[in-house]
Amino acid sequence: METRRLRMLLELARLGSMREVAEVLHTTTSTVSQQISVLAGEMGAALIEPDGRRVRLTPAGRRLADHAITILEAVEDARADLAPQSDPRGTVRVAGFSTAFRRSVMPALAPLAAAHPNVTVRIVEHEPTEAIALLLADRVDVALVYDYDLAPATIDAAIDGATLWSTRWGLAVPDADYAVADDADAAAVMAVFRRADWIVNSRNDADERVLRTLASIAGFEPVIGHAAESLELVESLVVAGLGVGLLPMDRPRAVGIRVLPLSRPGVSLRCRVIWRRDRPRWPPLAAVIAALIADRPAARVTVAAVQP
């Protein structure tokens, strides 16, 4: 069994197109097709099947691709022992939310390109639940996700990662005078707006869980009036007097909005970079991870439970 055939199968599992595999491996589509057919003959099982105008791996093909990861990693380790200065090359797919891209990924791209010019980063924007699903399905290589300290996310046992940063969040309300003491705790702040409509995220339930936790401490059930995907829409709804909701304390204020601090308990959003445990030795991915966590007091993710 030739490792180049395993590499073709693994790239086909990642990219889903023989043409793209041929481009990545600098060969022809017919060569890729022929070599995977030879591999199927060696294994005595069909490895691919038609999927419209494309192809996809059969269950046997996916199993062999999983084995190929271990085999090829061992080969790469051996090569690294002989050529420790070899430069990583390849395409790394990154899923994440917009703030993380602006705050963590974009600043890392220039240093990454300078250090590893043969590593390419492809970006796709997704909320954490979607990004984690793509990561577990091997449709992306790394993800940037978030949760709140009052609504911690459980992490699949197949995932590892590191914390990049955290930021305090407060309660966004119309800019007016309210009977809220400067040293009021979160329950007292929430209670002032117990009769308001509350704004939550339409694609992630983390902030709704935070609001319900704080409202429960304050002794009431919040009425969820609106669900918004963007922070800009949250701001517009608040300014229009249509509801209140969570916003970052360090976000520039829109005219007509006020963000009240929450304490005892406070609310912090945590951004984490995560990857599959069986992948970080792949050199391009290792280079991207190193660029993201460079010069940061990154803490390892504690895997506490398996995501349902």
Image (spheres, rainbow, N blue to C red):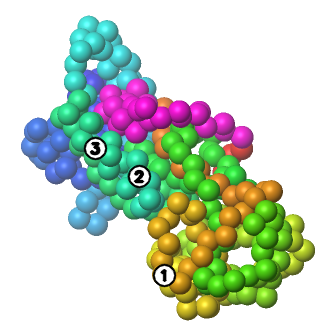
Which amino acid, by three-letter code, is at mark 3?
Answer: Leu
**Residue 259 visible in the picture:** yes
**Residue neighbourhood size for the residue with mark 2, other residues' Cα within 10 Å, grouped as few (<14), some (14–19), many (≥20):** few
- Distance from Cα at disc 3 to Cα at disc 2: 11 Å
Q: Residue at x 41, y 32 (%)?
A: 294
Say whether disc 3 or disc 2 marks the residue closer to the N-terminus: 2
Which mark is on residue 109? 3
Is 148 or 252 nearer to us in this picture? 252
Stretch of the chain drawn in magenta: 279-304
Q: Residue at x 32, y 62 (%)?
A: 51
Q: Position of residue 26 (x, y in %)?
A: 11, 38
- Distance from Cα at disc 1 to Cα at disc 3: 33 Å
Which mark is on residue 103? 2
193 vs 122: above or below: below
Q: Position of residue 246 (x, y in %)?
A: 63, 70
Say whether disc 1 or disc 3 marks the residue closer to the N-terminus: 3
Element under disc 2: helix
Q: Nearer the viewer, mark 3 or mark 2?
A: 2
Residue under numbered circle 1: 255
Q: Residue at x 79, y 62 (%)?
A: 183
